[in-house]
Image (cartoon, rainbow, N blue to C red):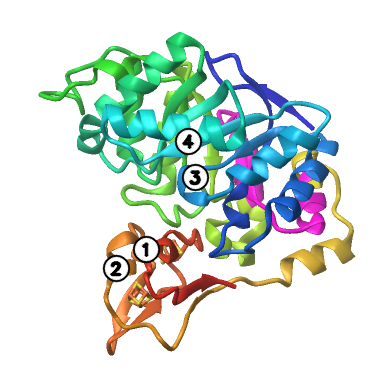
Amino acid sequence: MDRRRLGHSGIEVSRLCYGTLSFCAAQADLSPEQGGDLLLYAQSLGVDFFDTAEIYETYPHIRYVLRHGAARPVVCTKTYAWDRAGAAASVDRARREMDLDVIDLFLLHEQETTLTLHGHREAFAYLLECRDKGILRAVGISTHAVEPVRALTEAVAGRTDGYWAGLDAGPYRYADVLHPLLNVAGIGLLDGSAEDMAKAVREAHDAGIGVFGMKMLGGGNLLPRFDEAVAFALGMDCTDAYAVGMQSRDEIDMNVALFEGRPIPEELLLRTRSRKRRLLVEDWCTGCGACVARCASGGIRIVDGRAQPVPDRCLLCGYCAAVCRDFAIKVV
Ligand code: SF4
Ligand code: SF4
């Protein structure tokens, strides 16, 4: 497994990052033991970079690996906190629930624009303080949009005349890591095109920011263009790693082979690619619209008083399921 350093943070990771969103209740709904065993299996094949987030509810799965694994993986988590108190609560919770004194990467989750970054600067400043104290090793943002990538790059370069004109770039000058949505067709992007994002990511990487991408298959929408989508993602040399959600040993075997440039046995390819996922809305949906408000990708809408997925926009992230008080949404 190829290994890279995440920009100026110097943190070394496997190029394949295990995205644990796939374990959450809205997706495979795996117990800490089931998910933890998959993580341990991936680790035995050289994958030692695990991605989680406060809302994924997969801290127990990571803790399982920390207790049973032979080696300490690199762990990334994320928070939606916007102020100091919220960020402090998130850092405390992550350390407590994963039983980790030091967390490798801590990101502000789903930043949408420069204004969003500006509004979250107090939380980011707190993460920087934690980094300076040695509680965190690197800090950054995740995003589905091009603008925050450009804004972060400008901040790190000390530029205040572009996206940051009239706003406070202060803490973001010291950002280490970026986790952007990046796929060949730009599926799921909130602004710009795939080419815009690729260019912005390259500039971020050249500025010394560590980059690990996500959604290389656009939440499954790019399965019909599988070879092209994988070639694009793995060909992006400015992307140090890619987070991929996996729910079985077959999926791990396939992705490890892909990332190592080995041919994939036809049988394995058939087993993994034939499993098409979709967003399921149950009959008892009340049409309250909370899921529509939560989705930044336009992946769900209300039709005739009931939520209805928009398959070519839905990334199957399951974020909308977390806000459905009636438990009417699931990725199946
Ligand atoms: S949040 Fe749940 S109940 Fe409300 S519209 Fe969406 S699926 Fe239906
Ligand atoms: S509809 Fe739900 S699962 Fe699909 S992209 Fe939006 S939040 Fe994610």
Q: Position of residue 251 (x, y in %)?
A: 76, 56
User: What residue would you read off at disc 1?
Assistant: 323
> Front-most of 183 and 20?
20
Mark 3, mark 1: which one is toward the viewer? 1
Q: Which of the labelled discs sits on residue 93, or is there none?
A: 4
Instruction: Name which residue type carries label 3.
Output: Leu
Q: Is residue 15 magenta?
A: no
Dot 4 falls on a residue whose secondary structure is: helix
Q: Position of residue 114 (x, y in %)?
A: 24, 34
Q: Is residue 29 above or below residue 259?
A: below
- In the image shown, does 195 or 310 lie closer to the viewer? 310
Closest to the observer: 84 or 260?
84
Quadrant occupied by the C terminus: bottom right
Q: Along the horizontal axis of the image, is 240 left or right of 157?
A: right
Disc 4 beta carbon < 8 A from ligand 2?
no
Q: Is mark 2 within 8 Å of ligand 1?
A: yes
Which stretch is magenta?
Answer: 230-256
Disc 4 to disc 3: CB gap under 8 Å = no
